[in-house]
Image: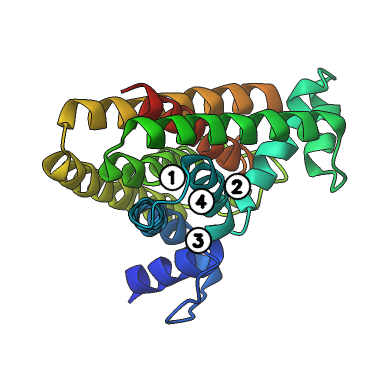
Amino acid sequence: MKLLTGFFMAWGNFLTLPCPLKRWDKDLKNYMLGFLPSVGLIIGGLWAGICLLLAWLTFPFLIIGFLLTLTPFALCGFMHLDGFMDCCDAIMSRKPLEQRQQILKDSHTGAFAVVSLAFLLLGFHAFLSTAISSGLDFINLMMIPVVSRSISAANVLLRQPMGHSQYAQGTGALDQQQKRKAVFIILLQLVVYCGGGLYFAIDPASTAVVMGATALAGLISILYGKRQLGGMSGDIAGYGIVWGELFGVLALALV
Protein backbone atom coordinates (compact mmCIF):
# COMPACT_ATOMS: atom_id res chain seq x y z
CA MET A 1 0.00 0.00 0.00
CA LYS A 2 2.88 2.40 0.69
CA LEU A 3 4.26 1.91 -2.83
CA LEU A 4 0.80 2.38 -4.32
CA THR A 5 0.37 5.56 -2.30
CA GLY A 6 3.80 6.77 -3.47
CA PHE A 7 2.85 6.17 -7.11
CA PHE A 8 -0.39 8.12 -6.89
CA MET A 9 1.33 10.87 -4.90
CA ALA A 10 3.78 11.19 -7.80
CA TRP A 11 0.90 11.24 -10.28
CA GLY A 12 -1.01 13.88 -8.35
CA ASN A 13 2.02 16.07 -7.70
CA PHE A 14 3.91 15.85 -11.02
CA LEU A 15 1.13 15.43 -13.59
CA THR A 16 -1.74 17.70 -14.59
CA LEU A 17 -3.78 14.71 -15.73
CA PRO A 18 -6.68 13.83 -13.37
CA CYS A 19 -5.40 11.40 -10.74
CA PRO A 20 -7.54 8.22 -10.64
CA LEU A 21 -6.81 7.63 -6.94
CA LYS A 22 -5.99 10.63 -4.76
CA ARG A 23 -3.68 9.67 -1.90
CA TRP A 24 -1.25 11.66 0.23
CA ASP A 25 1.07 10.77 3.09
CA LYS A 26 3.70 13.35 4.02
CA ASP A 27 5.93 10.55 5.33
CA LEU A 28 6.16 8.90 1.89
CA LYS A 29 7.76 11.71 -0.12
CA ASN A 30 10.74 9.49 -0.88
CA TYR A 31 8.48 6.87 -2.47
CA MET A 32 6.78 9.67 -4.41
CA LEU A 33 10.17 10.55 -5.92
CA GLY A 34 10.79 6.86 -6.52
CA PHE A 35 7.96 6.76 -9.04
CA LEU A 36 9.08 9.74 -11.11
CA PRO A 37 10.30 7.37 -13.89
CA SER A 38 6.74 6.05 -14.24
CA VAL A 39 5.45 9.62 -14.41
CA GLY A 40 8.03 10.13 -17.17
CA LEU A 41 6.72 7.05 -18.99
CA ILE A 42 3.18 8.46 -18.93
CA ILE A 43 4.41 11.82 -20.24
CA GLY A 44 6.62 10.15 -22.83
CA GLY A 45 3.81 7.88 -24.01
CA LEU A 46 1.44 10.82 -24.47
CA TRP A 47 4.22 12.88 -26.10
CA ALA A 48 4.95 10.15 -28.64
CA GLY A 49 1.25 9.41 -29.15
CA ILE A 50 0.43 13.06 -29.89
CA CYS A 51 3.38 13.21 -32.30
CA LEU A 52 2.16 10.07 -34.09
CA LEU A 53 -1.39 11.42 -34.32
CA LEU A 54 -0.33 14.81 -35.67
CA ALA A 55 1.98 13.19 -38.22
CA TRP A 56 -0.83 10.84 -39.32
CA LEU A 57 -3.11 13.88 -39.73
CA THR A 58 -0.35 15.43 -41.91
CA PHE A 59 0.05 18.61 -39.87
CA PRO A 60 2.93 20.82 -41.07
CA PHE A 61 6.10 19.86 -39.20
CA LEU A 62 6.60 23.36 -37.73
CA ILE A 63 3.15 23.21 -36.15
CA ILE A 64 3.88 19.71 -34.86
CA GLY A 65 7.15 21.06 -33.48
CA PHE A 66 5.31 23.81 -31.59
CA LEU A 67 2.71 21.45 -30.14
CA LEU A 68 5.37 18.94 -29.12
CA THR A 69 7.38 21.71 -27.46
CA LEU A 70 4.32 22.61 -25.40
CA THR A 71 3.22 19.06 -24.52
CA PRO A 72 5.82 17.85 -21.96
CA PHE A 73 5.80 21.15 -20.07
CA ALA A 74 2.00 21.36 -20.01
CA LEU A 75 1.63 17.76 -18.81
CA CYS A 76 3.65 18.53 -15.66
CA GLY A 77 2.02 21.91 -15.09
CA PHE A 78 5.22 23.77 -16.11
CA MET A 79 6.63 22.75 -12.71
CA HIS A 80 10.11 21.79 -13.89
CA LEU A 81 10.28 24.80 -16.19
CA ASP A 82 9.72 26.98 -13.12
CA GLY A 83 12.71 25.31 -11.42
CA PHE A 84 14.82 25.84 -14.53
CA MET A 85 14.00 29.56 -14.60
CA ASP A 86 14.66 30.00 -10.86
CA CYS A 87 18.06 28.31 -11.18
CA CYS A 88 19.01 30.36 -14.23
CA ASP A 89 18.18 33.56 -12.37
CA ALA A 90 20.26 32.54 -9.35
CA ILE A 91 23.26 30.99 -11.11
CA MET A 92 23.63 33.62 -13.83
CA SER A 93 23.51 36.46 -11.29
CA ARG A 94 27.11 35.46 -10.34
CA LYS A 95 26.57 36.83 -6.86
CA PRO A 96 27.85 35.29 -3.60
CA LEU A 97 26.33 31.97 -2.59
CA GLU A 98 24.00 33.39 0.08
CA GLN A 99 22.55 35.89 -2.40
CA ARG A 100 22.19 33.21 -5.08
CA GLN A 101 20.16 31.13 -2.63
CA GLN A 102 17.97 34.13 -1.83
CA ILE A 103 17.38 34.72 -5.55
CA LEU A 104 16.45 31.05 -5.93
CA LYS A 105 13.70 31.45 -3.32
CA ASP A 106 12.50 34.80 -4.73
CA SER A 107 9.11 34.47 -6.45
CA HIS A 108 9.88 37.32 -8.87
CA THR A 109 11.06 36.49 -12.41
CA GLY A 110 14.36 38.08 -13.43
CA ALA A 111 15.87 38.92 -16.79
CA PHE A 112 18.18 35.89 -16.80
CA ALA A 113 15.20 33.56 -16.43
CA VAL A 114 13.35 35.21 -19.31
CA VAL A 115 16.33 35.14 -21.66
CA SER A 116 17.14 31.52 -20.76
CA LEU A 117 13.52 30.49 -21.30
CA ALA A 118 13.42 32.13 -24.73
CA PHE A 119 16.51 30.29 -25.95
CA LEU A 120 15.34 27.04 -24.35
CA LEU A 121 12.00 27.08 -26.18
CA LEU A 122 13.67 28.07 -29.45
CA GLY A 123 16.01 25.11 -29.04
CA PHE A 124 13.20 22.69 -28.26
CA HIS A 125 11.17 23.84 -31.26
CA ALA A 126 14.14 23.78 -33.65
CA PHE A 127 15.34 20.33 -32.55
CA LEU A 128 11.87 18.76 -32.54
CA SER A 129 10.96 20.28 -35.92
CA THR A 130 14.22 18.97 -37.39
CA ALA A 131 13.63 15.51 -35.95
CA ILE A 132 10.07 15.39 -37.30
CA SER A 133 11.03 16.62 -40.76
CA SER A 134 13.82 14.03 -41.09
CA GLY A 135 11.89 11.18 -39.43
CA LEU A 136 12.08 9.88 -35.88
CA ASP A 137 11.51 6.75 -33.86
CA PHE A 138 8.62 7.43 -31.47
CA ILE A 139 10.22 5.13 -28.89
CA ASN A 140 13.16 7.55 -28.68
CA LEU A 141 10.82 10.44 -27.92
CA MET A 142 9.01 8.34 -25.35
CA MET A 143 12.18 7.47 -23.42
CA ILE A 144 13.46 11.04 -22.92
CA PRO A 145 11.12 11.97 -20.00
CA VAL A 146 11.74 8.58 -18.37
CA VAL A 147 15.51 9.05 -18.27
CA SER A 148 15.45 12.75 -17.32
CA ARG A 149 13.18 12.12 -14.35
CA SER A 150 15.09 9.04 -13.22
CA ILE A 151 18.34 11.01 -13.03
CA SER A 152 16.77 13.93 -11.17
CA ALA A 153 14.84 11.78 -8.69
CA ALA A 154 17.91 9.70 -7.84
CA ASN A 155 19.99 12.84 -7.26
CA VAL A 156 17.38 14.37 -4.95
CA LEU A 157 17.41 11.18 -2.88
CA LEU A 158 21.18 10.65 -2.82
CA ARG A 159 22.66 14.15 -2.55
CA GLN A 160 22.88 16.60 0.34
CA PRO A 161 19.81 18.86 0.25
CA MET A 162 19.95 22.62 0.44
CA GLY A 163 18.97 24.02 3.82
CA HIS A 164 15.64 25.51 2.72
CA SER A 165 14.68 22.57 0.47
CA GLN A 166 11.52 20.64 1.34
CA TYR A 167 13.68 17.49 1.05
CA ALA A 168 15.98 18.60 3.87
CA GLN A 169 13.57 17.22 6.43
CA GLY A 170 13.93 13.66 7.67
CA THR A 171 17.47 12.42 8.26
CA GLY A 172 16.73 9.53 10.63
CA ALA A 173 17.54 5.87 10.06
CA LEU A 174 13.99 5.12 8.92
CA ASP A 175 14.09 7.93 6.38
CA GLN A 176 17.47 6.77 5.05
CA GLN A 177 16.13 3.25 4.67
CA GLN A 178 13.14 4.57 2.77
CA LYS A 179 15.46 6.59 0.51
CA ARG A 180 17.48 3.46 -0.33
CA LYS A 181 14.31 1.62 -1.22
CA ALA A 182 13.16 4.54 -3.37
CA VAL A 183 16.50 4.58 -5.25
CA PHE A 184 16.15 0.84 -5.84
CA ILE A 185 12.64 1.43 -7.23
CA ILE A 186 14.02 4.09 -9.58
CA LEU A 187 16.77 1.77 -10.83
CA LEU A 188 14.31 -1.07 -11.32
CA GLN A 189 11.97 1.10 -13.38
CA LEU A 190 14.88 2.51 -15.36
CA VAL A 191 16.15 -0.95 -16.28
CA VAL A 192 12.68 -2.21 -17.24
CA TYR A 193 11.63 0.87 -19.22
CA CYS A 194 14.97 1.41 -20.96
CA GLY A 195 15.27 -2.29 -21.70
CA GLY A 196 11.80 -2.26 -23.22
CA GLY A 197 12.64 0.86 -25.21
CA LEU A 198 15.77 -0.73 -26.66
CA TYR A 199 13.86 -3.93 -27.46
CA PHE A 200 11.07 -2.18 -29.37
CA ALA A 201 13.25 0.53 -30.98
CA ILE A 202 13.73 0.56 -34.74
CA ASP A 203 17.42 1.34 -34.24
CA PRO A 204 18.56 0.44 -30.71
CA ALA A 205 21.87 2.27 -31.20
CA SER A 206 20.14 5.62 -31.86
CA THR A 207 17.83 4.99 -28.90
CA ALA A 208 20.86 4.39 -26.68
CA VAL A 209 22.41 7.66 -27.91
CA VAL A 210 19.23 9.63 -27.13
CA MET A 211 18.94 8.09 -23.66
CA GLY A 212 22.66 8.61 -22.99
CA ALA A 213 22.54 12.27 -24.05
CA THR A 214 19.51 12.87 -21.82
CA ALA A 215 21.13 11.18 -18.82
CA LEU A 216 24.53 12.87 -19.23
CA ALA A 217 23.13 16.37 -19.74
CA GLY A 218 20.75 15.95 -16.81
CA LEU A 219 23.49 14.71 -14.49
CA ILE A 220 26.01 17.40 -15.47
CA SER A 221 23.46 20.20 -15.05
CA ILE A 222 22.40 18.88 -11.63
CA LEU A 223 25.99 18.66 -10.43
CA TYR A 224 26.67 22.16 -11.73
CA GLY A 225 23.49 23.55 -10.16
CA LYS A 226 24.25 21.86 -6.83
CA ARG A 227 27.78 23.27 -6.81
CA GLN A 228 26.60 26.77 -7.69
CA LEU A 229 23.73 26.83 -5.20
CA GLY A 230 25.15 24.92 -2.26
CA GLY A 231 22.99 21.81 -2.18
CA MET A 232 20.24 19.83 -3.87
CA SER A 233 16.64 21.06 -4.17
CA GLY A 234 13.47 20.57 -6.18
CA ASP A 235 14.39 23.56 -8.35
CA ILE A 236 17.73 21.98 -9.26
CA ALA A 237 15.93 18.72 -10.01
CA GLY A 238 13.70 20.61 -12.45
CA TYR A 239 16.77 22.35 -13.87
CA GLY A 240 18.29 18.93 -14.56
CA ILE A 241 15.11 17.56 -16.13
CA VAL A 242 14.81 20.48 -18.54
CA TRP A 243 18.48 20.41 -19.59
CA GLY A 244 18.39 16.63 -19.96
CA GLU A 245 15.34 16.78 -22.19
CA LEU A 246 16.78 19.62 -24.28
CA PHE A 247 19.85 17.55 -25.10
CA GLY A 248 17.64 14.50 -25.55
CA VAL A 249 15.68 16.18 -28.33
CA LEU A 250 18.95 17.53 -29.77
CA ALA A 251 20.21 13.95 -30.01
CA LEU A 252 16.83 12.99 -31.49
CA ALA A 253 17.39 15.51 -34.28
CA LEU A 254 20.94 14.33 -34.98
CA VAL A 255 20.64 10.52 -34.93
Q: Is residue 64 left or right of residue 50?
A: right
Question: Tag 2's secondary structure?
Answer: helix
The residue carrying mark 4 is 72
Q: Distance between the Cα atoms at labels 4 and 3?
A: 23 Å
> Which amino acid type corresponds to the residue marked 1 in the rendered image?
Arg
Mark 1, secondary structure of its residue: helix
Q: Secondary structure at mark 3?
A: helix
Amino acid type of the residue that numbered disc 2 sits on in the rendered structure: His
Q: Residue at x 43, y 49 (%)?
A: 176
Q: Which residue in the protein does label 2 denote?
A: 80
Could you tell me which quadrant the N terminus lies in? bottom left
Q: Residue at x 55, y 65 (%)?
A: 13
- The residue that disc 1 covers is 149
| Residue type at the position of mark 3 | Lys
The reply to whether dot 4 and dot 2 touch (C-beta < 8 Å) is: no
State the residue in front, 175 or 208: 208
Tag 2 or tag 4, which sits nearer the N-term?
4
Q: Residue at x 51, y 63 (%)?
A: 15
Q: What's the CA distance linking mark 1 and mark 4?
A: 12 Å
